[in-house]
Image (cartoon, grey):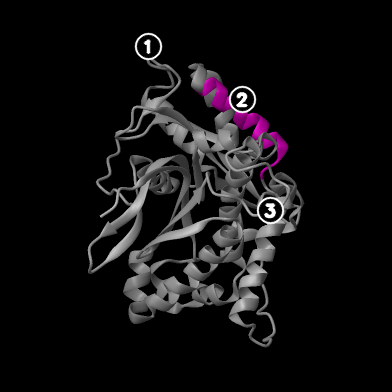
Amino acid sequence: MIPGSKVEAIYGWCDIRNFAVVTEVLQGKTMVFVNQVAAIVHRIVDEHLGAANKNAGQAFLMVWRLEQHLPTGGTDGPGSASSRERISDLAVMSFVRVVMELARDSSLAEYRTHPWLLAKLPKFRVRLGFGLHLGWSIEGAIGSAFKIDASYLSPHVNVAVQLEEMTVEYDVKILMSEPLVRSCNPRFSRHFRPVDRVQLPGSKTIARLFTVDLDDTTLRVQRRPPATGSASRSQRRQDRETEKQRMLVVEQDREFERDRFIRQMRRRHTQQFFQEYERGYLNYEAGEWDVAREALQRTMLLPRKVAGHLDGQPHLDGPSNVLLTYMEEHSFKAPEDWKGWRRLDRKTDTFYV
């Protein structure tokens, strides 16, 4: 029975897609499936200086404390602009790498050929949705002598949950809030794309939403590595600390640009596409919906690129489609009281801590 403490942190919510169907099909093996996913998510987040806080069935809450004392690695002291940028970049990069590893993992790839899963979900792949938000919370222990959990109590935690839920609507893998994006290194955040400017349910704050465009279908499954002698627990701990030290000295914007798998996932998003989308999005916010309509109609159908060649199967760009649908509801004429943002009326009763 001790009071909690107020902390500033980044909250990441991950949720396994189509989990109800997966549970129905896999039955008792669902636990094995969830733990396979959790092993990837927890490991990568830990390498990127985050911590797994909650396992809520098919979902996971990840936390990066901004006040944490970073391991030595050439950064400024805790609380400095440099450390905030590095932790924010690492939080985003961790989810980018989770998307990549989920697509390449050979064990998870076996579910793509499961006959009962394919019967209910054709072209099934193991996928997660991700929401990332920066804000404050009260950190402390919740429970009794029978059960105690380390928890984070705050509406800011629920924002991350709402963002993840909205990834389905916008058809993106990751949604990030504007406070988080502003905390990232500008050289890194220039790779993010704005998708909307909204007022979330239960919030008075107006903020832009951003995504990182990733096409995991372009990645091939990694061959199962040959079995090696199992390392001791102390050796594994030392290896993890070594990887964390490496993360501190690596600029994530350069890592993002150089990694061949990330480049492969972003191949179909050309510079021309981003320029045309930016033109449409800025005119959408400005209320020039006739111009926005013209530009976003050109970005709505995104051609798939495989090995540098178009395969003739266009992909619907989720953010372009959502904005066009909303403008169409108003006959592509901005309301008289339009201020560059819209209120989301969608309600959620779930408040995860």
The amino acid type found where label 2 is placed reads Arg
In the displayed structure image, the side of residue 31 where residue 86 appears, left or right = right
Q: Please tell me which residue is depicted at 44% across the width and 21% down the height of the picture.
A: 332
Above or below, 108 relative to 54: below
Q: Position of residue 17 (x, y in %)?
A: 42, 60
Disc number placed over residue 72 in the picture, else none: 3
Looking at marks 1 and 3 on the same chain, the residue that comes earlier in the sequence is marked by 3
Disc number placed over residue 279 in the picture, else none: 2
Kindly state the secondary structure of the residue where label 3 is placed: loop
* Residue marked by disc 1: 336
Label 1 to label 3, Cα distance in Å?
A: 54 Å
Residue segment shown in magenta: 269-284
Looking at marks 2 and 3 on the same chain, the residue that comes earlier in the sequence is marked by 3
The amino acid type found where label 3 is placed reads Thr
Mark in front: 1 vs 3: 3
The amino acid type found where label 1 is placed reads Glu
Q: Given contact means CB atoms under 8 Å apart, are the residues at marks 2 and 3 in contact?
A: no
Mark in front: 2 vs 3: 3
